[in-house]
Amino acid sequence: MLILWIKALHIIFVISWFGGLFYLPRLFVNHAMISDSATSERLKLMERKLYRFMTPLGVLALAFGIWLWLGFGYSGTWLNIKLALVAVLAAYHLYCGHLVKVFAADANQYGHVFYRWFNEVPVLVLFAIVFLVVLKP
Ligand code: HEM
């Protein structure tokens, strides 16, 4: 059953990708709260490495999702809404990459409260997508 292997891999890479989507903005919260340069340099390194690691995980999660979608004829309103939410998530991911560069240049403009709220975006999208794929309303 090829489809089940692809689905399992899709779920594995989604979970792995979300590890980064939850943790990277959490690093931004810490980064926005500190002022000493040694800690800032350590956080810059962690942010850069984490982003570099989570990008291929996201690409694989989407690639296996697209394979399921186009290879096995899934369709429906749930899928259309899911794809729109996936676009939000991809934009969020890319914006995180932009923020990694902003912090690296010591040019952050936002406080830790902003990043705490920012950190909740992938949580909400995760709830919405899992309800959609499981309940298929
Ligand atoms: C281009 C992006 C994506 C596409 C085209 C896609 C497509 C699909 C398809 C066609 C299925 C099979 C549904 C079924 O078996 O009923 C599926 C399963 C699933 N997807 Fe995605 N997906 C994508 C991204 C995501 C993302 C970002 C998440 C998480 C936030 C996610 C979470 C899941 C889960 C949890 C399942 C398992 C559902 C089940 O077996 O009942 N997918 N996906």
Image (cartoon, rainbow, N blue to C red):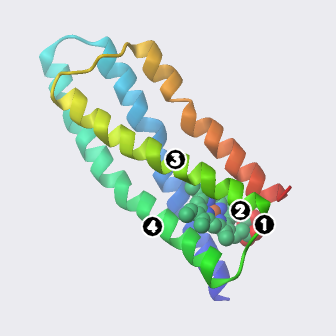
Figure quadrant of the C terminus: bottom right
First in sequence: mark 4 vs mark 3: 4
Residue at numbered disc 2: 79
45 relative position to 58: left or right: left
Asked if marks 3 and 1 touch (Cβ < 8 Å), the reply is no
Residue at numbered disc 4: 60
Residue at numbered disc 1: 76
Q: Which residue is drawn at 50% across and 62% down?
A: 13
First in sequence: mark 2 vs mark 3: 2
Badge nearest the viewer, 4 or 3: 3
User: Total of numbered circles in the picture?
Assistant: 4
| Of the pair 35 and 72, the residue shown nearer to us | 72
Q: Where is residue 64 in the image (x, y as percent from the top left)?
A: 53, 72
Amino acid type for the residue under numbered disc 3: Leu
130 relative position to 92: left or right: right
Q: Residue at x 56, y 34 (%)?
A: 121
Question: CA–CA distance between discs 1 and 4?
Answer: 23 Å
In this view, which residue lies farthest toward the bottom? 1
Asked if marks 1 and 2 touch (Cβ < 8 Å), the reply is yes
Mark number displayed over residue 89: 3
Figure quadrant of the N terminus: bottom right
Res. 109 image quadrant: top left
Ligand 1 within 8 angstroms of badge 2 C-beta:
yes
Ligand 1: image quarter? bottom right
Question: CA–CA distance between discs 3 and 1?
Answer: 20 Å
Q: Which residue is drawn at 39% across and 21% down?
A: 29
Amino acid type for the residue under numbered disc 2: Leu
